[in-house]
Image (cartoon, rainbow, N blue to C red):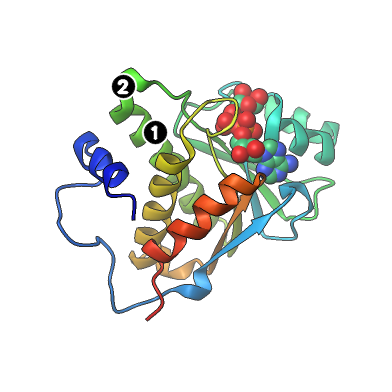
Amino acid sequence: PDIRTIGQLFQTGVLKAVSKPRYNPNVAFLDRISLFQGDITVMEVDSVVNAANESLLGGSGVDGAIHAAAGKKLYKECAGLGGCETGKSKITAAYKLPSKNIIHTVGPVYRRSDVETVAQQLESCYRTSLNLAIENNLKHIAFPSISTGIYGYPIEDATHIALDLVRRFCDSDVGSKASRSTCVVWSNKDKEVYETLIPEYFPAP
Ligand code: AR6
């Protein structure tokens, strides 16, 4: 484990002051997490998550790919949503995508001067997305690596936050109903980071 990174997360208050894992070490949940390298727009899941911006009107990166693949009707639905605050999530239909729905979440623009705030906002993206999935009875959700592209969040820190939240969600009463999160990575480097960190948060029994 990258102790320094976890230490930094402790300092920022993201990982609260506990000296042992915050999850139940007796439950592995290995069937609840998976990793996929490639284009999120081809995934046949219940919901793909879009790394959007506050306007919800599209952009580049994964947002551009999702809007391009889903078609103009997605833009029309998004335009009626009145935007979305950073750290929050909203759901739409998926139109031409093979998934059933799209959950649009707005990650923070990374700010080194305020790591505590951005970490809380990033964590909130994963939490609000998973809560929306549960509310809409969506079992299998695919997450891109939110905020780590154009928004500049360091991949290791962002992955710790993502996996820690997903793992704790699996342990929670509400999250025990969700069946599966797939982390979708684009680059080989991001894949390596996830391959290294997934066993930390989802250790084999
Ligand atoms: N499938 C899976 N992952 C992808 C894909 C794809 N098709 N395309 C890119 N990625 P980013 P952000 C990866 O920049 O940092 C937009 O303009 C990418 O390699 O898409 O949250 C929005 O409108 C990276 O690892 O999202 C916002 O303005 C990850 O997805 C802003 O960018 C996220 O990169 C959001 O920036």
Q: Is residue 72 left or right of residue 39?
A: right
Q: Residues within 10 Å of mark 1 (few under 14, many from 20)?
A: many
Q: Amino acid at mark 1?
A: Gln
Q: Is residue 22 left or right of residue 72?
A: left
The image quadrant of residue 119 is top left
Residue situated in front as seen by the camera: 39 or 142 = 39
Residue 81 visible, this orientation: no
Q: Position of residue 158 (x, y in %)?
A: 44, 41
Q: Which circle marks residue 19 in the picture?
A: none
Q: Is residue 85 left or right of residue 186?
A: left
Q: Position of residue 75 (x, y in %)?
A: 76, 29
The image quadrant of residue 172 is bottom left
Residue 181 visible, this orientation: yes
* Residue highlighted by disc 1: 121
Q: Position of residue 122 (x, y in %)?
A: 42, 37
Q: Is mark 2 within 8 Å of ligand 1?
A: no
